[in-house]
Image (cartoon, helix red, strand yellow):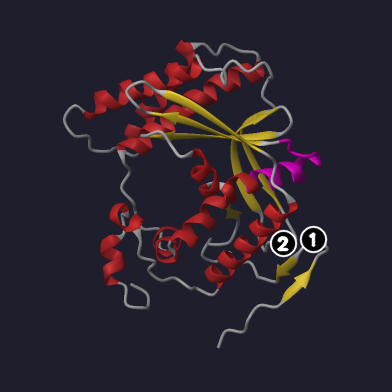
């Protein structure tokens, strides 16, 4: 019988004394995306992170990564005082697409690839003309990898921040097909944004003045929607630790089971899920 994990105190909040599981790679580090994956469906986490089953790549995923490459080229140019005009941005975009087609090819329906290429170009051009792109402040960091140890967690917390603005503000870019409900999206990405703030504050010893989500909407006329949030409060941080510890406890104790919901309709592991009977596949 598995014994319950005993909490301890570290001065900030109650901490679960969890050992690190490095043998299967599940807890060599902790990221907000992995926590969200486990909490969304623990069995999908098992298929993807433990069994490492292959998952087909969608054209939309390729497009999102390529658009991010274009945004990265733009802000890196601004950061380092190098060229960052439309030519540079689109070159990075098309290079990323070409590399993805080599390493992880996808099947397109007739005419789909051309439409996606045009959508990506249009959304990047729209961003370059937006107030967000024309911000006066120079970035403090672009595609920043942060990995920090926290007493509240058994393994390092890992995050990749798209952009860090003046005031240590983390910015996360999201491509989406339709105009989002920004309040709902802010709630959906709460774990990620709080993790970024914790990482930045731990790395710099300085406070974060706010957080930003930038939505690049792939409608016929592209939209750039910037949603600025206040910094996470102490209550928000305590919520993050509690959620993270609950997820890690489930991973360590191998609590993997189906969690049926709307996401099942687009899940890549439906057949594997149907075969699950309470044990290993």
Q: Residue at x 40, y 63 (%)?
A: 51
Res. 138 visible in picture? yes
Q: Which residues are magenta?
A: 195-209
Q: Characterize the local packing of mark 2: few (<14), some (14-19) or many (20 or more) Cα atoms within 10 angstroms.
A: many
Residue 157: % across, % down:
65, 53
- 205 within the magenta span: yes
**Quadrant in the picture for residue 21:** bottom right
Of helix, strand and loop, which mostly describes the magenta segment? helix
Q: Depth check: 195 or 148 in front?
A: 195
In the shown orientation, is residue 72 left or right of residue 196? left
Residue at x-position 54% and y-position 75% = 253
Answer above or below: position of 46 versus 173: below
In percent of width and height, residue 162 lies at 57, 34
The residue positioned 32% from the left and 55% from the top of the image is: 267
Q: How far across and down, in percent of the image, does residue 204 sit? A: 78, 39
Q: Which mark is residue 152?
A: 2
- Please determine whether, in this image, residue 280 is positioned above or below residue 237: below
Q: Quickly name the residue at label 1.
A: 12
């Amino acid at each position: 019988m598995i014994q319950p994990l005993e909490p301890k105190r570290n001065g900030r909040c109650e901490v679960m004394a969890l050992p690190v599981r490095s043998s299967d790679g599940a807890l060599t580090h902790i990221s907000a995306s992995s926590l969200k994956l486990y909490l969304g469906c623990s069995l999908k986490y098992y298929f993807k992170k433990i069994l490492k089953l292959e998952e087909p790549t969608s054209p939309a995923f390729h497009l999102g990564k390529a658009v991010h490459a274009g945004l990265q080229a733009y802000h890196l140019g601004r950061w380092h005082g190098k060229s960052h005009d439309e030519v540079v941005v689109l070159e990075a975009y098309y290079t990323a697409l070409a590399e993805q087609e080599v390493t992880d090819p996808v099947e397109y329906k007739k005419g789909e690839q051309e439409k996606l290429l045009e959508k990506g170009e249009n959304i990047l051009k729209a961003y370059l003309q937006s107030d967000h792109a024309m911000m006066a402040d120079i970035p403090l960091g672009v595609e920043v990898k942060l990995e920090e140890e926290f007493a509240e967690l058994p393994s390092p917390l890992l995050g990749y921040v798209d952009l860090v603005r003046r005031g240590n503000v983390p910015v996360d870019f999201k491509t989406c097909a339709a105009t989002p409900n920004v309040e709902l999206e802010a709630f959906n990405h709460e774990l990620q944004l709080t993790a970024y703030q914790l990482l930045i504050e731990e790395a710099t010893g300085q406070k974060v003045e706010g957080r930003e989500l930038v939505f690049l909407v792939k409608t016929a006329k592209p939209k750039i929607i910037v949603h600025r949030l206040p910094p996470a409060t102490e209550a928000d941080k305590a919520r993050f630790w509690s959620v993270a510890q609950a997820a890690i406890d489930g991973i360590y104790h191998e609590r993997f089971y189906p969690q049926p919901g709307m996401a099942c309709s687009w899940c890549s592991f439906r057949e594997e899920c149907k075969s699950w009977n309470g044990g290993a596949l």
